[in-house]
Amino acid sequence: MAAAIGVGVVGLGGRGRYFCDLYGSNPRSRLVGVCDLSEARLDLVRGRWGDSTGYHRHLEDLLAAPGLDAVIVATDDPHHAGPTVQALGAGKHVMVEKPMAQTIADCQAMARAAAVADGVFMIGLELRHCVLFERVRQLLDQGVIGRVLLGWGIDNVSVGGNYFYHNRMRRRDYIKSLLIQKACHSLDLLNWYMGGRPTQVFAYGGLDYYGRTESADKRCRDCERAAQCPFYVNHDRFVMDYGATVQIDDLCVWGADADVPDNSVLAVSYDNGTRASFTECHFTPEYTREFTFVGEGGKLYALYNNEGNFLIRVQHRFTDHVDEYRPVFTGGHHGGGDLRIMEEFLDCIARGRAPRAGVEAAYDSTALAIAAEDSIQNGVPVDIPPMLG
């Protein structure tokens, strides 16, 4: 039996602690060490793992830990590039939580580091590993609608208020854009299915629902309307959609400091001559993703929701025939993608093979989101810079 792969996690927020549990409980891997600047966060992990792993405040110390093979970068979004470049330079395999980064310059620096590194480099584009989206890829590869010419995707985010507008993610000086933070793995699917690399985007967006009316420091815990407010959260115990229970901020979603658009509409051009549109909305009643693709021979529609009620419908041109597929959801978060991408990462390390979504996919999805936000802010189409430009 092959030796377990030694994994370290950098960044111990809710998602980072979730990764500790995933890799620490997998018989193919072992949790060698964790790293965070916060002693309080280190103590939370220490309470779960005790003396079985190492605890570090400095990345250099984690990278020097005996038996460390791979690093999971789960730091806050603005701080992905530094640990990634350092870990790749130290000869480690690296998985970075999406998005790749928040700037084109950081993405390019990470891509250059990956190009000369010996280890596996992946971004957590876990939706590619959901059974629904795998089946969509198979059907398109089989040519059920012929060559894809036009596509559109929709992110319906019912939890937008509770996930993003209670905290600093509602501010552009921290998160830059929810297209980068939230939509990048849906944009990755759109790119994957369109079969090309995005070259230009024109986008509109606005803050039309959240923000504007309350003071920036108002909180749920002190609000006189908490019992009636659908956006009330318990800041001590909040359950994320991937199962982790975390502490969160509870600023009022109507805070006047919010300036991140809560809805966006994109028009995207690809290098293979195809075109697509994408919409993200954070105040819809449902939490779903929808994709539609029109090819030379028909149309394919796919519906995803967190409960795993997956649907694919294929309509064929010149007939009334419609095929329906309902891929079976077998459990796990992000449609099972979290567990399956973990196995993909471990497989790539063990077998020395390239991942399904490599550095180009990581760059294209993030660069598209960054360019779209630039377009929203400046009101003009934006060209997407080359990855190694």
Image (cartoon, rainbow, N blue to C red):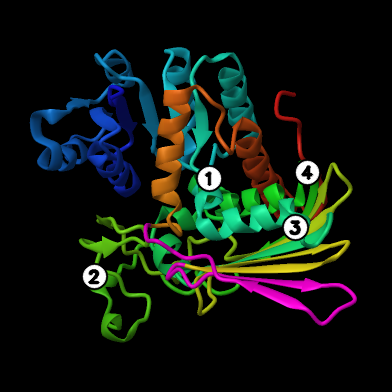
Give the prevailing secondary structure in the magenta stretch.
Answer: loop
What residue is at 32 percent from the left and 25 percent from the top? 5
Nearest the eye: 264 or 296: 296
| For residue 118, above or below residue 10 | above
What's the magenta region? 306-332
User: What amino acid does circle 3 point to?
Assistant: Ala
- Check disc 2: other Cα within 10 Å, few if <14, some if 14-19, many if 20+: some
Q: Which residue is mark 1?
A: 125
| For residue 43, above or below residue 297 | above
Q: Say if mark 3 contacts mark 1, CB within 8 Å.
A: no
Q: Which residue is mark 2?
A: 221
Q: Say if mark 1 contacts mark 4, CB within 8 Å.
A: no
Determine the image quadrant of residue 302.
bottom right
Q: Is residue 185 left or right of residue 271?
A: left
User: What amino acid does circle 2 point to?
Assistant: Arg
> Separation of disc 3 and disc 1 at Cα?
23 Å
Q: Which residue is mark 3?
A: 203
Q: Is residue 35 visible?
A: no
> Separation of disc 1 and disc 4 at Cα?
17 Å
Percent coordinates x, y for residue 100 in the rendering: 54, 37
Q: Mark 1: which secondary structure?
A: loop
Q: Which one is in front in this view, the residue at disc 3 or the one at disc 2?
A: 3
Q: Which residue is mark 4?
A: 196
Q: Say if mark 3 contacts mark 4, CB within 8 Å.
A: no
Mark 2 / mark 1, whichever is N-terminal: 1
> Separation of disc 2 and disc 4 at Cα?
48 Å
> Separation of disc 2 and disc 1 at Cα?
35 Å
Q: Mark 4: which secondary structure?
A: loop
